[in-house]
Image (cartoon, helix red, strand yellow):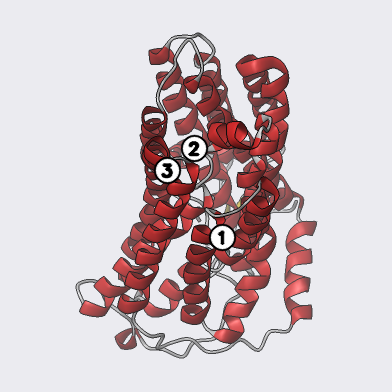
Amino acid sequence: MSASNTASDPTPAGPSSTTSSTPSMRHARGSREYRRANLALFAAGCATFAMLYATQTLLPELSDGFHLDPATASLSVSVTTGALALAVIPVSMLSERWGRSRVMTISVFGAALLGVLAAFAPDFGTLVALRTVQGVALAGLPATAMAYLAEEVDGPSLGSAMGLYVAGNSIGGMGGRLVTGLASDLGGWRVALVAVGLLALGSAIVFRVLLPPSRNFTPSTSSVRQLAGVLRAHLADPVLRRLYLLGMVFMAAFGTVYNYLGYRLLAEPFGLPPTVVGAIFVIYLAGTFSSAASGRLVGRLGHRATLWAAAAITAAGALLTLPDHLTLVVVGLIVLTAGFFTGHSAASSAVGLRVTEGRAQASALYLAAYYLGASVGGPVGGVAFHGRGWAGAVVLVLGLMAAAGWVAAGLTGRVAVAAAGVDDAAEVGRRPRTHARSAA
């Protein structure tokens, strides 16, 4: 899904372009342009993440309508997240040449139109194909938005601007699920996709009308070969590889639960209507609070201990959902969501701390791994759920969290705090070193 200390997907800024702006040319908090930029990107973020997960609440209905097992139905989600993951880095390169505003505009409008068109898919194969193309289109916003803000908003105001954009991502992800749950209850999955698509189109218009033009963008002169060299260097770093794997594993577990819990809640002994099942996604807000707490926890315990705690909390939440008792299921989902976002925030923030150059590319690789986790975890979780019921899905989550704990164990003493020029002293238990990056 978000350099993420909030309940959101980490969003890379793309390769750094050269700017020659002075602080007076940037939008300051309280200015008209600052408010417009914030509202524009909030609207675009809502639209993007509403569309990304638009079919997640609809999976049981897609299964019934097209006579599919849960794993196959989940392809309507996993192909979109997978396409986004693969497109993020190339699209971030395009934004370096074409400009941030242009790429974001094409992304949001194109994805919204594809979302409406998907509602009229005559068969599941066509729906999957349209959702795949929509995933590529959706990559434009997370690949570009934070770079736009970093270039156009002055330093003291940047934190609050980033926070509002990320809040839009989170609210869009939750709101899209709520809208599809309500709309499908009223008119079926096609009506639900039309509703999300039209809301996204309206948000795209708001975005285009409000977004101030770029003042500080300068096309990058970096070549494809230079970018590839930066990516190879990041992938050669064993610490970054562990952090990318952690993002993938946590997201695979999270996607498994949210993809298939709807099947369980619609069936007996719960028998809940789709509107109520969709409303359960309000629990997603638990991530807002746990992400903020994650930052404090990392400062106190270090990344490794925080990631261990996150894996344990996520596993405990999964276990709580096992009994056929709605209260326990809801409590377990809250706990699991809080644990997931704690781990996601700790891992994604560690990526930014690890590197001293090419932070945008490092974050892009994390985002790619994160969404690949959703793409892989969806079908695998569906196989577990189809074969062993909800207990099978929970066992898969427990196995993934055990893997997360094992991967995190290798981070001891290895996460460098590049901005401060110190090692992660809370983990290694010694005084910070003076160099910017510890040996891997």
Residue for badge 1: 421
Q: Is residue 409 above or below residue 29?
A: above
Marked residue nearer the N-terminal end (1 or 3): 3
Mark 2 residue type: Thr
Label 3 secondary element: helix
Q: Which mark is residue 57?
A: 2
Left/right of residue 187 with respect to residue 115 in the rendered view: left
Residue depicted at 76% across the width and 55% down the height:
237
Q: Is residue 245 visible?
A: yes
Most foreground residue, 57 or 358: 57
Marked residue nearer the N-terminal end (1 or 2): 2
Residue for badge 3: 180
Mark 1 residue type: Gly
Crowd class of label 2 (few under 14; some 14 to 19; many from 20; radius 10 Å)? many
Q: Separation of disc 1 and disc 3 at Cα?
A: 47 Å
Marked residue nearer the N-terminal end (3 or 2): 2
Left/right of residue 209 with respect to residue 6 in the rendered view: left
Q: Position of residue 84 (x, y in %)?
A: 63, 58
Most foreground residue, 274 or 26: 274
Label 1 secondary element: loop
Crowd class of label 3 (few under 14; some 14 to 19; many from 20; radius 10 Å)? many
Label 2 secondary element: loop
